[in-house]
Amino acid sequence: MTKPEPGARARTFQPRPMKLSVLTAALQELTPRAARDPDPDLAIEQWLEFARELDCPFIQLSAALHPSLTDVPAEALLDPVANTLDLREPFDAGRAARVRRAFDATGVGLSDIAYFDNMLVADRVARRTKQEFMLRVFDAAVLLGTDAVCGFVGRNMQLEMDANLEMFEAEFIPLLEEAKARGLTYRIEQCPMPGWTTLDRWHNNIAYAPGPWIALHRICERHGVGDQFRIHYDPSHAILMGQDSRSVFQYLKDQGYGFLIAGFHVKGQVVDARGVSAWGYGGQTLERGDWNGAEPSPRPADRASAWKKQTVICEHELPGTARHDPLAYLQNRSVDWLDHQLAARELLDIDPARTFLVVEHEYPRARVQDKALLAPILKGSLAFTRAIDEAAAAMFALQHEVLASQDIPVQGVGREAYRS
C-alpha cells in the first residue's frame, strides 16, 4: 500500500465540466419564414425559449445570408443553414436591447455567433458580400456581449493551396484586424467542405487540419492578429479525414500550438466501411450526377451530388445517436467521445470551465423540422453530451489531480496518439 508523504495534503476533487451550447441551425424553421421575415428578431426569441425547454444553458446563434441574397441555392447544400440572426438590416442598439431582454428572461446565454461561408470565394462581388456580412456579424457579437464568432476560412477553388495562402494574407487578415479592433476572436471550423465545388477538389476550406492551422497562424502572427485566430474543433471532420482527436491534439502540443483550439463542436461521423472499400477516403470521383458530360450541371439540385465525395463514405452523427462501438473508435471510424473530452483536457491549453461545447445537429435522418418531434431528439443528445463531458471531467480530476497529488499512479495504458 502506498504511504503518503509526511505532512502531505490531499488535493480536493473538483471536476470542471465544459459549458454546453447548441447551434440554432438544428431547427432552421422554428419560426416560420412568414413570421420572421417582417420581424427578424422573433426567431431569436423563440429559439431561446426552445433552448430553455431543452435545458441547454447556451446557444450558438446561427447567422447566414438571407435566402434571397445567397449565392448558393438551398438545393445545392448538404446541411441547410439558418439565419436565426437576420442581418439584412444592421443589428443596432434597439434590436440588441430587445434580444438581450429575451436572453435575460429565459436565463439562456450566448456562447458565440456562427456564420459558415466561403470567405475566399473566387467571385470578387460574392466575396465582398460575404466579408461585409461578416463585419455585421462582428458588430452584432459586440452588441450582444460575446467575445467570439465562429466560421470558415474557405478557399478560392481557381487557385492552388500556396496561392490561397497569399489570398488569405490579402483577404482574411483584414477581417482579423476588424475582429481585433472589436475585441473578438475568430474561431475557425475545420470542415474540408468537399462538396463546395463540382470540381474533384476535396480540401475546399484551407484551414482543414493542424498543418494548415499552424501555417495560417504564422501569417496571422506576422500581422499582429495571432490572438484573433483560433480553431473551433469539430471531431466529425477529423474522422472524415482518417484522423483521431487524441493524435490531432498531441500533434498540436508537440508543435507548441496546443493553445490554438478554443472551442468545440460536438458532431460525430460514422464511416461506412463499404463506401470506403468502393471509393477510398476521397469519396466518389466520377458519375456523381453533378456533371453533364464535359460541363458541370446548371441545375442547383444536381450540384448537391458533389457532396458524394463525402456522403458515400460516411454520415454525420448527432452525439448519442450512434451505437457504442469500441472497434470503430480504434479504427477512427466513429468519435470516441469519452476519450475526445479526456484528451482535450490532457493535451490542450484550455480552461474547461470556460470552454464551450456546442452540439451541432447534422444527422440527416434525424433532421426533422418539427419542433415536437425534434425536441426529444435534441434533449437526448444534449443529455448524452453533458454526461460524457462530466465523466471526462471526473476522470481528469481524479487521475491528474487527486491521485497525482498523492503520488498514486493511474492504472492501465489507455488510448495512445499516433498508434497504427
Image (spheres, rainbow, N blue to C red):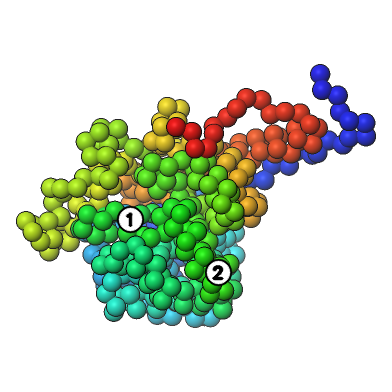
Image quarter hosting the C terminus? top left
Q: Amino acid at mark 2?
A: Glu
State left or right for residue 294 relative to residue 57: left
Measuring from the top left, give residue 416's x and y in whole percent. Answer: 54, 34
State left or right for residue 271 relative to residue 180: left
State left or right for residue 40 relative to residue 94: left
Task: Give the residue at mark 2.
Answer: 221
Residue with the most extreme top position: 1
Q: Nearer the viewer, residue 39 or 377?
A: 377
Q: Nearer the viewer, residue 134 or 202?
A: 202
Q: Amino acid at mark 1?
A: His
Residue with the most extreme right position: 7
Q: Above or below — where is 214 with respect to 158?
A: above
Residue with the most extreme front position: 162
Give the total number of marks visible in the rendering. 2
Q: Nearer the viewer, residue 322 or 275?
A: 275
Residue displayed at 13% across by 60% down: 296
Q: Is residue 307 visible?
A: yes
Q: CA distance from mark 2 to mark 1?
A: 24 Å
Q: Residues within 10 Å of mark 2 (few under 14, many from 20)?
A: few
Q: Above or below — where is 376 with respect to 191?
A: above
Residue displayed at 53% across by 75% down: 223
Question: What element does badge 1 sit on?
Answer: loop
Q: Residues within 10 Å of mark 1 (few under 14, many from 20)?
A: many
Question: What element does badge 2 sit on?
Answer: helix
Task: Give the residue at mark 1.
Answer: 203
Measuring from the top left, give residue 63's x and y in whole percent. Answer: 41, 66
Measuring from the top left, give residue 281's x and y in whole percent. Answer: 30, 42
